[in-house]
Structure formats: structure tokens, C-alpha cells
Image (cartoon, grey):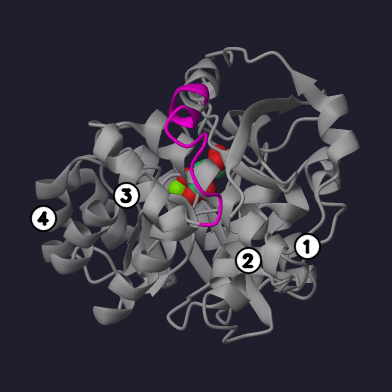
Amino acid sequence: MAKISEIEPIVLAHSEKGSATWASVMIVVKVITSDGQVGYGEAVPTLRVINVYNTIKQVSKGYIGKEAEKPEENYQEWYKQDFYLARSFESATATSAIDQALWDIIGKELGAPIYKLLGGKVRDKIPVYANGWYQDAVTPEDFAEKAKDVIKKGYKALKFDPFGPYYNWIDEKGLKEAEERVKAVREAVGDEIDILIEHHGRFNANSAILIAKRLEKYNPMFMEEPVHHEDIEGLRKYKQHTSLNIALGERLISLKEAAFYVSEGLVNILQPDLCNIGGITVGRKVISLAEAFDVEIAFHNAFGSIQNAYSLQLASITPNLYLLENFYDWFPQWKRDVVYDETKVEDGHVKVPEKPGIGVSINEKLIESLKVEPKELEVLEEPVWVVKGTWKKY
Ligand SMILES: O=C(O)C(=O)C[C@H](O)[C@H](O)CO
Ligand SMILES: [Mg+2]
């Protein structure tokens, strides 16, 4: 059986930026086997580009020489070595990206897309929701105009963060501003469209509860990360005082972390990120964990087109899928070109790619031409994790 002979982290950048600064670059992992097979994965940049790049090199030491077609065993072996894997975002994303590439290699060896290796599709098209669409939106009118464009593209659901620069607590002025933005979007899209409210984990429980009571009249389908990510007691309090669906999961980096939120009943829509949670090997286990508790899945999918391709493969085998997050229509063109623009959104759905492994072709020449040295991201008043141009009051 082929051995893993090379693992190369590659940072891609381009002058054309997308809607989220933290995804202005892509970190790609290229794995090559002893018989020349090549697999690709994607790691998460955010504010850790240099650290993730270097961690991929360190994690690779635990994978080089291992059998390429054994991602499960390789993950278990690495878990033994990497004492802080479940506590280290850098380790988790590096391991996830390498794991993705190994599943890509197996699929290519067997001539089958990953969904086939996992028992087959339960749907041929993936229903998606829009994010990234509200760049530079500030006033309610801005949000309403842009929301109409989203619906014209055929999306049946859209997510946005209506809170401007408010953080930790929110006052009456902030509540009013958020309500006016949500009201404008609801009036623009009508009652049939799912509105998803993103909080980016910025509020204390009291403020999050005030927000829920203020916005519930607009029937949001879920409230994402309403309280600070590590605020378990705040989340319990939020759940006790509101009736809205809680969505979270993008920051989870292990199966057992996901199991905690699901078994404690603290999440209704789980949003694992295949570039954080442990790649395909752990991602498929999280799907079943959620299914056992009647929790729905909406994979977090906010970085690049390789992550998007893997998310489509796993979304196709997920019986308890709500919707797949999608930035694709608001990606800079270069990100779409990395996969030859093979995962277009049509009428709010994406056809499941059928090519072996990752499902799409990878534009290796473009990757070569976009290669840059790992670098720090600028830290400005507007945090890198918001949709650009929205950290504003009006
Ligand atoms: O996609 C999500 O759920 C995120 O929390 C990430 C941000 O919304 C996205 O990158 C826009 O900044
Ligand atoms: Mg989010």
C-alpha cells in the first residue's frame, strides 16, 4: 500500500479579496504518496497563518511514512502523539487538512468520490444558505437591498450579523439598530425565507437574551453563537430564557467537544467545520452523533473552495442536514478558479461533485501561481471575523 511521502503546506493569496478578511488567504495542504498520487486539503487561516503553516510541517512528521489509505488509524496514532490536539486550534486544523487529503487520495485510488466511500448520497443536490452577501451594509436599507439580490439568486435562506460594533453587551440603541436591520430584511424577503442570525459569539447571556426577545417576532430560524464561545453557563441561561434554535460548532476541534454540547442539549443546529473538527474522519462521526440526538447539521463553511468541496461531499451523506453554509457567490473569483468553478450555486442548491476523492478538479497551475510566503494578517478596528464594512453603527 502506498506510503505518505510528502506533505506541503501552501499559502495562497491574491489582490482580489472576499467578504471576510480572515479568509483573504487560503492555506492548502498537498499530500503526495510513494506511488505519486496527490491529495489536497485546506486548513483555516484566521489570525494564525504563520502558526498554522508551521504546525502543518510539525504534524507532517507524524504522518510521513504512514500508509496513505489509513486516515482513521493515522488520526488515532497522531492523537497519541499530539498531547494538546483537542486543545490546539493549530494542531486541529493542520490534522484536519492532512486527513482531508488522505481521503482525497483513497477516492482517487478507488476511482470514487468520497461520498461513495461513506455509504452513498442521500441527496443529489445540496441546499445552501448565503453568507458573505452583506459586505459594506450598514443601514436597514442596505441590508434589505442586498437581501433581495440574494433571493433573486434562488437562495431560500440567508445569514447575517446585524449587531455592528456592539460587543459583550448591547444597549437600547444597539437593540433598535439590530431590530431595524432584521425587520428590513424580513420585509424584503418575505415569510418563506429562513433568516439566520449570526452573533459571532460576542455577547454575555443577559444581552443575548434581550436580543432573542427583541428579534423573535421576525421568526429567525436559528441564533448562531449567541454568547461567548466558552461561556457554557451563559449558554445554559440563554437556553432557559429563550425558545429560539441555538446554532454553534465552527470553533469545535474534537468529537468529544461536540458530544458535550449535543448531549447537554445546548445546540439545535450543529455547525462542525471540516477544517477544524478533524477532517472527514471525525466529521463523519459528528454527523452520526448529532443524528442520535435529533440535532441537525449545517457545516460551517467560510474559508476556501477546497473546504467547500469537502463540505459538499459530507453534506451529501448527511441524513440530518439542515443547510450547508455557502460564501461561493461572494468568493473572490480566484477561490472559485482553484476548483475550476465546478461547484456553482444554482437556485439555492449545489450539485454533488462526482469526480474521484474530493469530487472536483484542483487547478494546480493556479495554486503554483498564487503561492505566497506565510504572513500575518493586519489587525484593524474592525475584527477580521466580521463581514467587511459592517462593524459600524448608523
Ligand atoms: O461563517 C460563519 O459562521 C462565521 O462566523 C464567519 C463569519 O461569519 C464570516 O467569516 C464572515 O466574516
Ligand atoms: Mg459563525
Residue 100 percent coordinates (x, y): 56, 51
- The correct choice, above or below, for 56 with respect to 154 in the image is above
Q: Which residue is drawn at the image coordinates 22% and 66% (left, top)?
A: 262
Query: Could you tell me if residue 326 is visible in this image?
Result: no
Q: Quadrant of residue 79?
A: top left
Q: Residues within 10 Å of mark 3 (few under 14, many from 20)?
A: few
Amino acid marked by disc 1 = Thr
Q: Which residue is mark 1?
A: 343
Choose the circle earlier in sequence order: 1 or 2.
2
Q: Residues within 10 Å of mark 4 (few under 14, many from 20)?
A: some
- Contact between labelled residues 2 and 1, with CB atoms less than 8 Å apart: yes
- Distance from the alpha carbon under mark 1 to that under mark 3: 32 Å
Q: In terms of depth relative to the viewer, which is nearer, 357 or 166?
A: 357
Q: Residue 354, which numbered label?
A: none
Q: Which residues are magenta?
A: 57-69
- Distance from the alpha carbon under mark 1 to that under mark 2: 9 Å
Residue 351 percent coordinates (x, y): 75, 75
Q: Which residue is mark 4?
A: 237
- Contact between labelled residues 3 and 2, with CB atoms less than 8 Å apart: no
Query: Could you tell me if residue 245 is visible in this image?
Result: yes
Q: Which residue is mark 3?
A: 76
Outermost residue to the front: 1
Q: Which residue is drawn at the image coordinates 36% and 44% (left, top)?
A: 251
Query: Mark 2 against mark 3, which lies toward the viewer?
Result: 3
